[in-house]
Image (tube, helix red, strand yellow):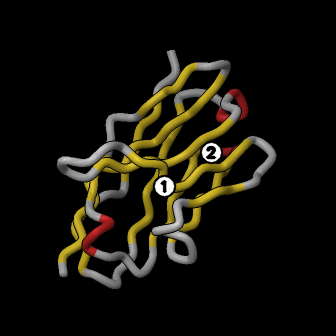
Amino acid sequence: QVQLVESGGGLVQAGGSLTLSCAASGSIFRFNTMGWYRQAPGKQRELVAIIISGGNTNYADSVKGRFTISRDNAKNTVYLYMNSLKPEDTAVYYCNGYRLGIDYWGQGTQVTVSS
């Protein structure tokens, strides 16, 4: 059973930084892609950043230049470094792993950015 566990959320002032971590119960090599999504109250879940097995990355336009996704294969962990945070970044952030047509999700971690 694959498990993804997020950590690192919290409350931060606008302009601040946070780092989210997603620890997988097994090797992250098994995933074709890993990514971070977020869901704000009353809104649909949206893609924030994704990293494929070869290391290429892709970001939502709203976070380009501010967020960075990376992976540490030795630690089976994916990170989301978030800088210059804005109130509109407030959401529950979910880790995702995709493999063979199946999406795996973590339980989510709350990020709140105060103005």
Q: Residue at image x 28%, y 81%?
A: 14
Q: Which residue is mark 1?
A: 48
Real-space CA distance between mark 1 and mark 2, rounded to the nearest whole angstrom = 22 Å
Q: In the rendered view, does 101 fall on the left or right side of 42?
A: right
Q: Nearer the viewer, residue 72 or 100?
A: 100
- Note whether 22 is above or below 13 in the view shown: above
The residue most toward the bottom is 15
Q: Residue at image x 46%, y 68%?
A: 62
Position of residue 68 measured from the top left corner of the image (x, y, whole percent): 57, 66
Mark 2 Cα-neighbour bin, 10 Å: few <14, some 14–19, many ≥20: few
Q: Nearer the viewer, residue 7 or 106?
A: 106
Position of residue 32 measured from the top left corner of the image (x, y, whole percent): 70, 33
Location of the C terminus (image quadrant): bottom left
Asked which secondary structure carries label 2, the reply is helix
Determine which of the numbered discs, if any, sits on residue 96 in the image. Answer: none
Asked which secondary structure carries label 1, the reply is strand
Position of residue 89 measured from the top left corner of the image (x, y, whole percent): 32, 66
| Front: mark 1 or 2 | 1
- Sequence-first tag of 1 and 2: 1
Q: Which residue is mark 2?
A: 75
Q: In the rendered view, does 71 fall on the left or right side of 63?
A: right
Q: Nearer the viewer, residue 55 or 19?
A: 55
Q: In the rendered view, does 44 fall on the left or right side of 76?
A: left
Disc 2 residue type?
Lys
The residue most toward the right is 54
Disc 1 residue type?
Val
Q: Total of numbered circles in the picture?
A: 2
Q: Residue at image x 52%, y 60%?
A: 60
